[in-house]
Image (cartoon, rainbow, N blue to C red):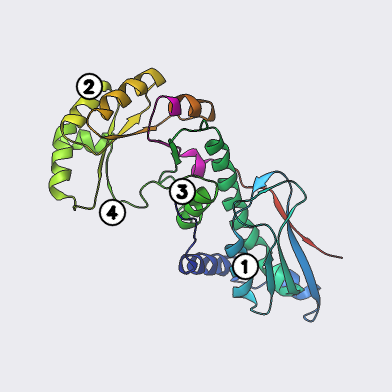
Amino acid sequence: MESTELPRVLVEEIVARALVEDLAGGDVTTEACVDPVTQSRARAVARGDLVACGALVFARVFAHIDPTLVVEAVTPDGARASGGTTLWTVTGRARSILMGERVALNLTQRMTGVATMTRTYVDAVPAGSATRITDTRKTTPGLRALERYAVRTGGGMNHRDNLGSAVLIKDNHIVACGGVRQAIERARGRATHTCRIECEVDTLAQLDEALAARADIVLLDNMDTATVAEAVRRARATGALTEASGGITLGRIAELAKAGVFAISVGALTHSAPAADIGLDFDP
């Protein structure tokens, strides 16, 4: 399992940017209605079953607004929680809590939603299978670090983080370059010794060409399960890893894992995960 640590330096910039967006004009409602000396305690409560994610982000939102606020993580990231469970609490000046409420919930609801969906896909992998569930680069602009952390928190793993972290030759690269072999050979001549070369293939003929050109990983795009199983058999003879992608649904995870793919990449983990329902309830 990959590390689920979320570097604080990445959180600070995202939180600061979100608060500037929400508080650029101040908070006229809170300033008008709430006495500056009023103290309160608020609880972030799950409204349904979920996998908690975002304790650090929740805390940093309120720390940016008011360092005197006290935040407690009641439910650790990665833990399953049912409706009614308190995830995090924040105590201190009511004005400060209200000013940070929306940003704190927007970010953690998104993260928790991704973690919850990821756990569902991970749980669909048959027991004893070594197949891993990974995300893709289909992330929300500006929030990739948080969404990638949420995938890890849900038990999944991350694909390449950005365009510079690995070679992934896609269908349009192949068309623009003139063929699978040409693309792989050019990439091999340019890539560093620490960089693997992955090539997307749509057919078994393309697969054979990619394997002959010594691709390290082959991405099996939109193949039915029988074709995936044959592709895995051919790839194993060369030592290349296989990744299934495209048209991946929850119902196909078990059969693809049984076909023996090394990884199943699921764009839906980040581009289609619904935000978790979390509310911030003030104690009376």
> In the visual, does 148 lie left or right of 163?
right
Q: Residues within 10 Å of mark 3 (few under 14, many from 20)?
A: few
> In the visual, does 54 lie left or right of 164?
right
Which structural element holds mark 2? helix
Three-letter residue code for mark 1: Ala
Q: Marks 1 and 3, Cα distance to the nearest angstrom? A: 25 Å
Q: Residues within 10 Å of mark 1 (few under 14, many from 20)?
A: many
Number of labels in the image equals 4
Q: Marks 4 and 3, Cα distance to the nearest angstrom? A: 23 Å
Q: Quadrant of residue 232?
A: top left
As drawn, 127 above or below 197: above
N-term-proximal mark, 1 vs 2: 1
Nearest the eye: 246 or 23: 246
Q: Is residue 24 visible?
A: yes
Image coordinates of residue 12 in percent, x first then y, are: 51, 69
Query: Which residue lies most toward the front here?
Result: 128
N-term-proximal mark, 2 vs 4: 4
Q: Quadrant of residue 123?
A: top right
Query: Which residue lies most toward the top here?
Result: 226
Which structural element holds mark 3? loop
Return the residue at label 4.
164
The range drawn in magenta is 257-272
Q: Marks 2 and 4, Cα distance to the nearest angstrom? A: 28 Å
As drawn, 207 above or below 94: above
Return the residue at label 1.
59
Return the residue at label 2.
205
Q: Residue at x 46, y 48 (%)?
A: 1
Three-letter residue code for mark 4: Gly
Which structural element holds mark 4? loop
N-term-proximal mark, 1 vs 4: 1
